[in-house]
Image (cartoon, rainbow, N blue to C red):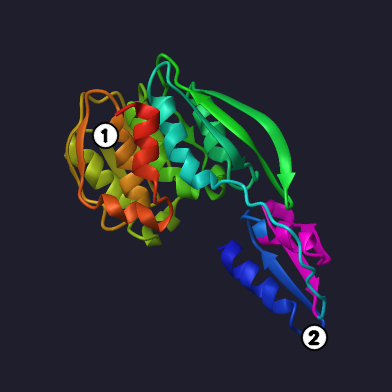
Amino acid sequence: MASAQVAGCTLLAGLAADGVTRVTLPGPARDHTERMLPAFGIALECDALAGGGRRVSVRGGQALAATDVRVPGDFSAAAFLLAAAACEPGARVTARGVNLNPTRTAFLEVLAEMGAEVRIANQRLETGEPSGDVTVSGPESLRAFDVPAAWLPRMIDEAPAWAIVAAAARGTSRLTGASELRVKESDRIAVVVGNLRTLGAEVEELPDGFVVRGSAPAMRGRVVTHGDHRMAMAFGILGALPGNEIEIDDPDCVAVSYPTFWSDLASVTGS
């Protein structure tokens, strides 16, 4: 599997090694380390491979140069509030200064395919990372969409948020190619499916994803997060939609990645 974490660790270790360290990623993966190192004065080479992969090389012994770093906002965190806007007709949410690295923004493409209006403004580079302001507006009616499996590496963390959008859409949506979700903080495929069924949605579990039949009636019930922050946030936005009454069993688990999630959600929903 093309792992950005493994590649990043190896490249950093390569700075202290003799000779050239080469990392081959067999498929698409995030490139944050490759964008960051040049900002600190490190020369590296990146060669594209067939099938969407790449080979990255770095020579050991290079000295890092101190620099000022401005870190763009976490797109994966912003995605939940953007999803909330997409689900509510006439709603609009803007995430300012958010990371727009193309290896992780397929969720915006999916929202647009489902009928939401997506606008990007004030684009710029922050220490090699593209960033900008993203505004998502909810349409009168979301339409179902089958997410191409090839897009999953660019939206794997947003899959739970997508499931909520699919539950609010008209028609049947499908997501496949996401077997990695089985080994996150929880088995996110099983947890998403189990909780949506508990709340009254019609959903089918697949080995590498799920099928969601949207436009369910008002959803009510208690969500079991298994301590997974993304499960809490995903079902939190579903609970914020008008007509739904949803209890989250462990709301505090969002502190892992987004400590102010609940107050921010309340500020944009007025609840």
Question: Magenta span has 50?
Answer: yes
Separation of marks 1 and 2 at Cα, in angstroms: 54 Å
Q: Nearer the viewer, residue 211 or 66?
A: 66
Q: What residue lies at 63% left-to-right and 57% top-to-bottom? A: 27
Q: Nearer the viewer, residue 212 or 223?
A: 223
Which residue carries the number 2 mark? Answer: 18
**Magenta residues, start to end:** 33-60
Question: Magenta span has 106?
Answer: no
Q: Residue type at mark 1? A: Gly
Q: Is 21 on the left or on the right of 204, as rendered? A: right
Q: What residue lies at 42% left-to-right and 39% top-to-bottom? A: 80
Which residue carries the number 1 mark? Answer: 239
Q: Quadrant of residue 163?
A: top left
- Identify the element where label 1 is drawn: helix
Q: Is residue 164 above or below residue 230?
A: above
Q: What residue lies at 58% left-to-right and 32% top-to-bottom? A: 134
Q: What residue lies at 80% left-to-right and 85% top-to-bottom? A: 18
